[in-house]
Amino acid sequence: MSDSVNARVEELRFFAANLQRMGEALTENYARLRTQVHRINESWRDQDNAKFMNVFENDADNIRRIAEHMEAYGRFVTAKADRLQDYLNTQMGGY
């Protein structure tokens, strides 16, 4: 059982790291895209572009929140993995 729980701790750590990386990447990529969109928007001012800009800016808060949730949940999962590892170390050391 110990081996399967240890594997689970590593799986949790891997998942947490991926969540945090993805949240950071989402934030960085969206910021780059936002810069490009605003640069293009300076010279392109038709009705379709105005609609797109409105949707794009409204969705910015949702994207930011998703990225923050991913990073926060990654930290939460890391903390759970740490506690599980501490428990396992205590159990293994007690025998």
Image: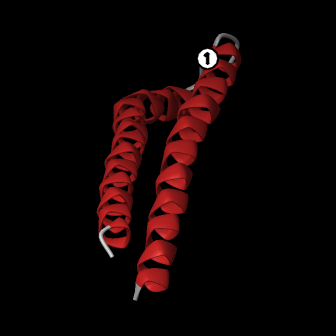
**Left or right, residue 31 beside residue 63:** right
Viewer-nearest residue: 95 or 19: 95
> What residue do we see at 57% from left, 32% from top?
30
Image coordinates of residue 51 in percent, x first then y, are 46, 33
Image coordinates of residue 54 in percent, x first then y, are 42, 28
Viewer-nearest residue: 16 or 31: 16
Q: Mark 1 points at which residue?
A: 38
- The colour mode here is secondary structure
23 up-or-down from 15: above or below: above
Q: In which quarter of the image is the C terminus?
A: bottom left
The furthest residue to the top: 42
> What residue do we see at 43% from left, 40% from top?
67
15 up-or-down from 66: above or below: below
Badge 1 element:
helix
93 up-or-down from 46: above or below: below
Viewer-nearest residue: 25 or 77: 77
Viewer-nearest residue: 37 or 48: 37
> What residue do we see at 40% from left, 33% from top?
64
Q: Quadrant of residue 28?
A: top right
Q: How crowded is mark 1: few (under 14 residues within 10 Å), some or many (20 or more)?
A: few
Q: Which amino acid, by three-letter code, is at mark 1?
A: His
Image coordinates of residue 46 in percent, x first then y, are 59, 24
Q: Quadrant of the N terminus?
A: bottom left
**Left or right, residue 43 beside residue 46:** right
